[in-house]
Image: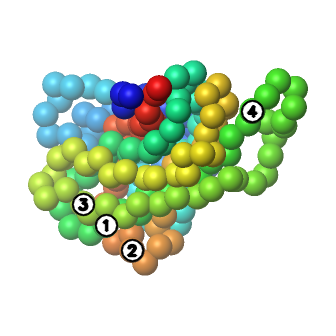
Amino acid sequence: MATHQLSILGVNTLPDTSGSVFLEPYTIKATNDLWAMLVAIFNDTATDLFLSGQFVVPQNYVGSAAVIPVWTSTATTGNVVWGFEYRTIAGDDSASMDQATSEQDSTVTDAAPTAAHRRLTPTISPTATNFAAGETVEFRLSRDGTSASDTMAAAAILFDLLFQYADA
């Protein structure tokens, strides 16, 4: 059995309408302008900010689901609360893609980097049995500024969002 990681950010990822989550070139926040890439900025607010998206569970999925936000900040103190809310849709012509509820909302609290721009990779652990090979997963990745545990007074800079799983 092997462990795989799949990036689940893509062209179908959409920031919320608050204006506090947006995509920008990393060169705006970075000191060195050599590596120009697009990152998602989650500003420091007292609200629940999110990106929405969807992906398909790989056909070789057998379990051990995890979601890993790859992030950093210019801040070096405080915590960020990341949330992963999702629902799965299975079958062919058997389930609606237009639902108003989720299956689960899992969170992880992660400390700011010890030096600006250091890579952080906390693990969010959704229920592995909620996923099955070939299912569509609709999700929201959030920074929960309403949580008393989210104390970092700066933007969280998201580089990637990984779906980690085991195969047969």
Q: Hey, what amino acid is under mark 3?
A: Ala
Which mark lies nearer to you, 2 or 4?
4
Mark 2, residue position? 149
Mark 4, residue position? 90
Instruction: Identify which residue, 18 or 5, lies in the foreground.
Output: 5
Element on which disc 3 rests: loop
| Mark 2 or 1, nearer chain start | 1
Considering only vertical position in the picture, is 124 above or below 60? below
Mark on residue 79?
1
Q: Is residue 121 visible?
A: yes
Task: Say left or right for 100 vs 141.
Answer: right
Q: What separation in Å lies between label 2 and label 1 (alpha carbons)?
A: 7 Å
- Circles 2 and 1 in contact, beta carbons < 8 Å: yes
Instruction: Identify which residue, 62 or 112, lies in the foreground.
Output: 62
- Circles 3 and 1 in contact, beta carbons < 8 Å: yes
Q: What separation in Å lies between label 2 and label 3 (alpha carbons)?
A: 12 Å
Q: What separation in Å lies between label 2 and label 4 (alpha carbons)?
A: 35 Å
Q: What separation in Å lies between label 4 and label 3 (alpha carbons)?
A: 37 Å
Q: Hey, what amino acid is under mark 1?
A: Asn
| Mark 4 or 3, nearer chain start | 4
Looking at the picture, how far across and down is residue 71, in whole percent? 31, 46
